[in-house]
Every structure is written in structure tokens, then in C-alpha cells.
């Protein structure tokens, strides 16, 4: 075989050492060529779940969930696990971070029973419930547990169970936390539920187990009052030097208590101290999850065509019925508006929160793809049995009026928390949550960025240094504008579809403000609309269309736009009036998990559903930007 010189030369060149004269001479002037080492503004968005339960939550582990924290972390990091009922599970894309927020109330009871834990067996009630489970009566055991929870009578107090499982949970989180690659936050859920009305909060710690391990979780056995929770958080920070925040969720099933005008225990009107403490410890709110969407209510926002999205508004986890007069104290947009009014009265806004989404799944499975819904509880894992999968009652089970019940088929496959941060670490992500530079999605991973300032121009949308310029000349989501310089707020908005998801229908700006009479108002502006649609005589844009094919459960991106942007200046700005602005991005129609179930298992649509329940438009909600005179 003939070898040419051209074949030999590259090998000779690669093997020959470079001589000193081949190296470039040092320059006389030091040039910092890379711009990135000195930058400190958030340059990436990270997606995660701040609300996942494993078998260590008693209301999960005692009703079928056999997968603990390690399985949850493995799955979230991209691994394959086996579900509680034997199905192989893998996420289409791993998460960037996860908070396992197992309930504080008898944390670890189910695994303690499974392993016949000595601390459990040393207590009479602990041995009794252990023996009931081992005697193959898990329903009876669950009833034993829920009875003591409702009576606020912790039969295991003093056993050491709470501290033991909390420290184990801390150690597991530290082990799976890998700064720069995956963040495993330490956290838990405080499950306040007076008379079945939801006041739950998820606590998220900035710290590792060296600090969190010195305390034990506060539970609803200790108190149901959020003000006591804030005292617990305050004491933790004072004693350890650490940091912790709380994320409320599901105001839509609180019967008006989540954003109430009075305190829970003393029934006093909320005051400035209450407002300051609430916003110190609860900077963000979980606005969308499996148990419904809490951004807006159609009756409170009758001109908003997108307000009716997974609206769960009929009852609670207890016997009470929700009535329309409670809704203004249950939904995020209404609370944000009322917060502006309170700021004028108290000097502090008690409802000045950013927004995230999360799952509240009790399966250890933090999947939000519609074709991968493993249910609210493990008993509702994918199955051709519609009794559990479709018709299990989630809300108003105890309500004597059966018409108030909400069933599993009405559950949303949601949501996700999106965090703008410089790094994927506990510290950086937590700090972004505290400053509210976060947004919620209904499960999709679309990217949204918004800045507000006084001097932006439309040409700034296409700048190569868009983000750096945005931070230098304005504020991001979660920020504040003050002292209007004779100009209206100007917003720069960019949105990019989920790379594996649906195109975008439109970008909207939701404005809330307090008018000259002191009344809260709102308006939804369509600031970018796909496919060159034009508004009708009523000012509304026609629907984007619908490419969903329910027979094979598909859609296509022949409608909508993959990338959208908007420059918007408030046309009705009054510099004397308090206001907020947040961005809502709507995707084109896509199939719901119910539609995927119907095809996968060959089952009929749930009774009471319509075609509208098989197709939806997923979305994102950014944290607001506030203007204060």
C-alpha cells in the first residue's frame, strides 16, 4: 500500500514538540479578553420542584407510596426508578433542583413501621399502629393516624422519631446535593389545616445539615397559626445564623384564610408588623400545582379570557363549602391588588410575593409532562382502572354536598418553579427566591425574561447584551420601581418556547393598580401575539387555533411562534398610583394527561368532562414588578 506525504505530515506535526519561538510573545498590555469572570448578574434559568412528597410523608407512605427520598433524588437527577406499583419511570429531562417537602406531622412513620423501628415500638401507640399495618390493615392504620392529627394529639411526642428521621433526611439531601450540577434543598411542609382549610407552607432552608440538623420541624401539632411558624423561623435564624423561607400554596382551598384581612388566632385586623413579618419569611407563593391553579378566578377577572384554568373553587380538604365572597382572599391576582391597598394604609404590603409553580405530588415522582402523569397519590398511578385514576375524590371528600367534590381527573399536571440565577447552588437559588427573581409554569419549561425601567427603547429588545443592559438600566421580575421621572414604566420581555414543547400563543402584561378613589383595579394587555393576528372590533385577538388530534393525542407547531418578544410602555400610567406588572405567557393548545390516558388504556373520557378538559393551553406567570410612588 502506497502512503503519501500528505498522510504522514499531520502525524509528524502533532508529535513534534513546540519550540520556544513558536509561542506568541507576551503582550505589553494585559487584556481581559473574556467578559464573563467579572459578571455577576443571573445568566441562566433553572427548573425545579419545591414541593415533592415521598413515602416519608405519612399521607403518602400509608396509602401506597413505597419510594423514599433517595428514589426521588435519583429520578430528579435523571435516573430510572421503579414506581410504587412496579412501573419503570424516567424523566424526559432531569430537574436542576428539588425540595423534598415531606410533612412534619410524624415524619417517617411509614418507613419506621416497615423497618420496625425501635423508637416507634417503644411507644404504646407506635407499636399498636405498627401491628395494624403488619396485620395487613393499612386503611385502619391510616385512620388511626389521621384521628390523632385531627385531634392535634401527637402520640409519638418525646419518642425521638421526629429528630431521627429529620436528621436522616438532612443527610440524604446533603449527599445528593452537588453544587453546580444539582441542588438538593433541605426542607419540610408545615401542614396547618384548621377545620380542613388549607394554610400549608413549605419551608426551604439555605443551609446544610450542620445548621438544619440542630432543630426539628415545627408541625401542626405545635400550632396552626402562620405567625407561630414565622417565630419558629426567626428563632432558627437567630440560633444558627442560617436562613429559611416559607412558600404558601393552595389558597384556592383555604376558604378565604390564605390572604385574609384578619389574623388567624386573635382575629385582629392585620397590621404593619404582620405585613413585615409575612413578607420577610414568605417572599414567594406557589401559584399553580396539581390541586388547581391559583393565579386568577374567572368571576374576579370576568374580562380575562384565560382566567379559568384548572379552577378548583368549590370546597376544601374538610367539610366546609367555599363561597364566592371568599375568592378575593384565595387567588394570587386578587391578593396582589389588595396588597397595594394595604400598603397605602399600613405602609407595608403584606401580599408582595413572587410566584412559582410546583407539583405537590405524593408519589416521589416530580414529572410534569402530560404524557407522564403518575398521579397525585401512588394509588392513582397510570392504570386502566378508572375508579382510582379518574374518580378518586381529592377535594370536598368530607363535604356532605357531593356536588362540591373535585375528582382526580380534574387534576392539573403541574407545575414547575423557574429560578434566574448565576449558579446552580443552594445559596444562589435560595437568594434568587428571596429576591423573587422567579416564575411559575404549569409544567412546561418555557423561558421568560422581563425587565422594567424608565429609559428602555424598543431597539433594546435586539441588543446582544440584552440581559446585562436590562440589569444595568432597570429591574428584573420581583423588583421595584420608584420615583417616576415624568415617564411611564417600560417593559422589555423575551419568551422562548420549551425546546421539546409547544409554540407560544401570546405574551400578556397583567397590571394591577389603585385608582384615585383607593380601589384596586386590573387590566390584561396583549403585548405580543403570534401569527400576525389582528384584534377584532372588541379589541380582543382571535384564538390562535387548535392543531390537537385527540385520536392519536398529538399536536403540531404549525401555529404560534417559537420565540416572542415585546417592548411595552404603560399607556395609562399615573405616577401617583401604586401598581404592579407581571407577565403571563400562553402556549398554543396541547393535549392533557387525561387525553393521553384515554389512548394508552383505551378508556372513555371521565364522566362529567368535555372536550375542553382534554385540551388546554399551558402557561407561565412571572413574579411582579412593583411601582411605588
Image: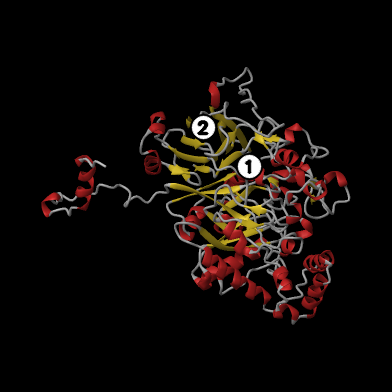
In x, y percent, where is residue 417?
A: 57, 49
Find numbered disc 1 in the image and state the secondary structure of the residue it sits on. Answer: helix
Q: Is 486 left, or right, of 66 in this rendering?
A: left
Nearest the camera: 261 or 29?
Answer: 29
In x, y percent, where is residue 215?
A: 59, 73
How are the residues colored?
Answer: secondary structure
In x, y percent, where is residue 18?
A: 16, 53
Residue ID for mark 2: 562
Q: Which one is closest to the eye, mark 2 or mark 1?
A: 2
> Residues under labels 2 and 1: Cα distance?
27 Å
In x, y percent, where is residue 515?
A: 59, 36
Q: Is residue 306 above or below residue 468?
A: above
On the question of residue 33 being in view, the answer is yes
Nearest the camera: 112 or 235?
Answer: 112
Residue ID for mark 1: 333
User: Which residue is situated farthest in the left direction here?
Assistant: 21
Nearest the camera: 414 or 315?
Answer: 414
Q: Residues within 10 Å of mark 1 (few under 14, many from 20)?
A: many
On the question of residue 106 being in view, the answer is no
In which image quadrant can residue 228 be found? bottom right
Residue positioned 78% across, 33% down in the render:
610
Q: Which mark is residue 200?
A: none
Residue positioned 42% across, 33% down in the render:
486
Q: Residues within 10 Å of mark 2 (few under 14, many from 20)?
A: some
Residue positioned 72% across, 35% down in the render:
614
Find numbered disc 2 in the image and state the secondary structure of the residue it sits on. Answer: loop
Sequence-wise, the earlier of marks 2 and 1 is 1
Amino acid at each position: 500500500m502506497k502512503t503519501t506525504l500528505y498522510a504522514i505530515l499531520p502525524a509528524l506535526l502533532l508529535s513534534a514538540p513546540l519550540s520556544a519561538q513558536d509561542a506568541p510573545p507576551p503582550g505589553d498590555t494585559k487584556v481581559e479578553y473574556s467578559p464573563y469572570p467579572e459578571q455577576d448578574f443571573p445568566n441562566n434559568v433553572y427548573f425545579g420542584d419545591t414541593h415533592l412528597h415521598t413515602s416519608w410523608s405519612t399521607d403518602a407512605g400509608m396509602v401506597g407510596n413505597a419510594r423514599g427520598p433517595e428514589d426521588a433524588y435519583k429520578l430528579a437527577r435523571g435516573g430510572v426508578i421503579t414506581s410504587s406499583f412496579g412501573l419503570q419511570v424516567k424523566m424526559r429531562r432531569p430537574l436542576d433542583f428539588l425540595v423534598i417537602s415531606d410533612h412534619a406531622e410524624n415524619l417517617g412513620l411509614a418507613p419506621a413501621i416497615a423497618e420496625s423501628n425501635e423508637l416507634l415500638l417503644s411507644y404504646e401507640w407506635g407499636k399498636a399502629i405498627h401491628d395494624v399495618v403488619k396485620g395487613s390493615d393499612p386503611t385502619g392504620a391510616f385512620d388511626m393516624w389521621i384521628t390523632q392529627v385531627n385531634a392535634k394529639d401527637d402520640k409519638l411526642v418525646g419518642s425521638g422519631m421526629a429528630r431521627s428521621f429529620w436528621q436522616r433526611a438532612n443527610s440524604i439531601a446533603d449527599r445528593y446535593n452537588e453544587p453546580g450540577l444539582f441542588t438538593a434543598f433541605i426542607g419540610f411542609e408545615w401542614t396547618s389545616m384548621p377545620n380542613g382549610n388549607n394554610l400549608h407552607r413549605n419551608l426551604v432552608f439555605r443551609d446544610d445539615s450542620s445548621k438544619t440538623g440542630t432543630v426539628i420541624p415545627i408541625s401542626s401539632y405545635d400550632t396552626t397559626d402562620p405567625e407561630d411558624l414565622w417565630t419558629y423561623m426567626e428563632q432558627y435564624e437567630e440560633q444558627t445564623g442560617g436562613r429559611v423561607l416559607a412558600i404558601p400554596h393552595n389558597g384556592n382551598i383555604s376558604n378565604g384564610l390564605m390572604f385574609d384581612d384578619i389574623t388567624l388566632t386573635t382575629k385582629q385586623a392585620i397590621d404593619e408588623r404582620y405585613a413585615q413579618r409575612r413578607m420577610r419569611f414568605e417572599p414567594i407563593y406557589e401559584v399553580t400545582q396539581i390541586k388547581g391553579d391559583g393565579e386568577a378566578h374567572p368571576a374576579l377577572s370576568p374580562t380575562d379570557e384565560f382566567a379559568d384554568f384548572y379552577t378548583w373553587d368549590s370546597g376544601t380538604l374538610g367539610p366546609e363549602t367555599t363561597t364566592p365572597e371568599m375568592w378575593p382572599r384565595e387567588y394570587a391576582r386578587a391578593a396582589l391588588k389588595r396588597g397595594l391597598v394595604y400598603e397605602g394604609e399600613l405602609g407595608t404590603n403584606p401580599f408582595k410575593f413572587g410566584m412559582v409553580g410546583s407539583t405537590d405530588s405524593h408519589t416521589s415522582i416530580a414529572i410534569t409532562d402530560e404524557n407522564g402523569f403518575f398521579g397525585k397519590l401512588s394509588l392513582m398511578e397510570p392504570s386502566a382502572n378508572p375508579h382510582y385514576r379518574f374518580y378518586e375524590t381529592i377535594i370536598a371528600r368530607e363535604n356532605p354536598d357531593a356536588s362540591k367534590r373535585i375528582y382526580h381527573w380534574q387534576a392539573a399536571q403541574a407545575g414547575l418553579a423557574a429560578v434566574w440565577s448565576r449558579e446552580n447552588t443552594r445559596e444562589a437559588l435560595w437568594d434568587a427566591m428571596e429576591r423573587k427573581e422567579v416564575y411559575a409554569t404549569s409544567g412546561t419549561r418555557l423561558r421568560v425574561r422581563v425587565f422594567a425601567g424608565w429609559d428602555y427603547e424598543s431597539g433594546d429588545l435586539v441588543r446582544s447584551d440584552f440581559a446585562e443592559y436590562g440589569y444595568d438600566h432597570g429591574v428584573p421580575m420581583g423588583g421595584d420601581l420608584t420615583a417616576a421621572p415624568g415617564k411611564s414604566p417600560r417593559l422589555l420581555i423575551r419568551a422562548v418556547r420549551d425546546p421539546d414543547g409547544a409554540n407560544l400563543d401570546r405574551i400578556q402584561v397583567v397590571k394591577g393598580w389603585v385608582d384615585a378613589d383607593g380601589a384596586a383595579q386590573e387590566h390584561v394587555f396583549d403585548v405580543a401575539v403570534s401569527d400576525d393576528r389582528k384584534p377584532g372590533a372588541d379589541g380582543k385577538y382571535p384564538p390562535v387555533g387548535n392543531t390537537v388530534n385527540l385520536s392519536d393525542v398529538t399536536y403540531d407547531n404549525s401555529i404560534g411562534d417559537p420565540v416572542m418578544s415585546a417592548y411595552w410602555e404603560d399607556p395609562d400610567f399615573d405616577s401617583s398610583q401604586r401598581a404592579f406588572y407581571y407577565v403571563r405567557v400562553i402556549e398554543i393548545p396541547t393535549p392533557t394527561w387525561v387525553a393521553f390516558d384515554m389512548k394508552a388504556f383505551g378508556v372513555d373520557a371521565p364522566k362529567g368532562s368535555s372536550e375542553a378538559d382534554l385540551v388546554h393551553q399551558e402557561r407561565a406567570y412571572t413574579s411582579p414588578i412593583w411601582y411605588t410612588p
